[in-house]
Amino acid sequence: MVKLGFQLPNSGPLATAANIIDLGRKAEALAYHSVVVTDHVVVPWKIESRYPYNESGRFIVPADGNYFEPLTLLSFVAGATSRLRVGTSVLVVPYRNPVLSAKMLATMDALSNGRLFVGVGGGWLAEEFVALGSPPFADRGRVTDEWLEIFVKLWTEPKASFIGRFYSFDEVGCFPQPVQKPYPPIYVGGNSRPALRRAAKYGQSWHAFRVPARELPAKLNYLEEQRAACGRNTAGMGFSVRYGVRIVAPGADASRRPGEDPERVFVGDAAQVLEQLKPIWALGPTDAIFDCRTGSFTEVVETMERLAGEVYPRLEQ
């Protein structure tokens, strides 16, 4: 069974505390498996970096809009719900001190009674790296790998030490350790070959973000090759997908809005979206997580209801 998830609006005009909690509780009532949030700490006013997840290459989030920090927000959501799993899609790993990040994630897992999963990525916005004083943007892949190794050590060893290229520490305890054993699942995001190699080495799942269905088989073949090269037992490992979606009532206007790329955002009534999703389901993802970034609050709720009540059950038949 594919586990169904939805992104809460932690950025943009819908990003308010009331909306986020209402949608988190709505997701729980509709029996969604998980909710996720995205990660930016600051949004530079001038961006020359190319956004890699749409055709235009432009990042459309304004610098003067709300953008809630994801770890703080997920703790808030976990405290307002009882069953939902909570996760990042994705946490930009190099932005934060690795020891502090490991501690915050372990704390969240402990306080939520094991409901955390950790989607991770290396980041794309060079200007934000500079603003945060993060390690150099050019080193983000190697830094991400090193930070993940630090996470695992602190989550699993009672007396942890680490000597790396970018960070070192000696004999520390980091308790409480996560409730989930050996540690919360790591979903490695990114659609490039380096990201797939990272997923093969460190992840319990590759987290594919808005990858057109026709491109997924080749990427999944490469992922399995890399897992085999790492010598990892692939039992229980999977891949998760994330796409945009907007589902309207039968006969309602389903014309596409700016940002709704046809292969990355599925739009239509329930029957139309069902047909658009079938090629994704046929590939056997473990998780399918959706966002509705182009809708009003009413449209987001309608999309959540129709996705959970009219589309998902027919995909799982």
Image (cartoon, rainbow, N blue to C red):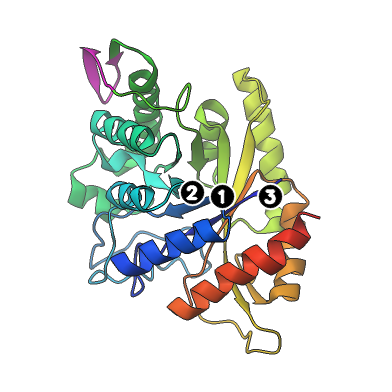
Along the horizontal axis of the image, is 22 left or right of 252?
left
Q: Are marks 1 and 2 in contact (CB under 8 Å)?
A: yes
Instruction: Look at discs 3 and 1 and give the one toward the viewer.
Output: 1
Identify the secondary structure beneath mark 2.
loop
Residue 216 is labelled as 3
Q: Are marks 3 and 1 in contact (CB under 8 Å)?
A: no
Q: Residue furthest right?
A: 317
Q: Picture coordinates of residue 261 (x, y %)?
A: 58, 71
Instruction: Mark 3 or mark 1: name the one nearer the start of the chain.
Output: 1
Instruction: Look at discs 2 and 3 and give the one toward the viewer.
Output: 2
Residue 33 is labelled as 1
The CA distance from mark 2 to mark 3 is 28 Å
Q: Are marks 2 and 3 in contact (CB under 8 Å)?
A: no
Along the horizontal axis of the image, is 10 left or right of 169?
right
The CA distance from mark 3 to mark 1 is 23 Å
Q: Residues within 10 Å of mark 2 (few under 14, many from 20)?
A: many
Q: Picture coordinates of residue 43 (x, y %)?
A: 26, 62
* Residue under pointer 2: 84
Q: Picture coordinates of residue 77 (x, y %)?
A: 36, 53
Q: Which quadrant: the C terminus?
A: bottom right
Q: Picture coordinates of residue 38 (x, y %)?
A: 39, 55
Q: Amino acid at mark 2?
A: Leu
Magenta stretch: give its range: 162-175
Q: Residues within 10 Å of mark 3 (few under 14, many from 20)?
A: some
Instruction: State the residue in front, 125 or 178.
Output: 178
How many marks the image carries: the answer is 3
Identify the secondary structure beneath mark 3.
helix
| x 37%, y 64%: residue | 20
Q: Is residue 276 covered in magenta?
A: no
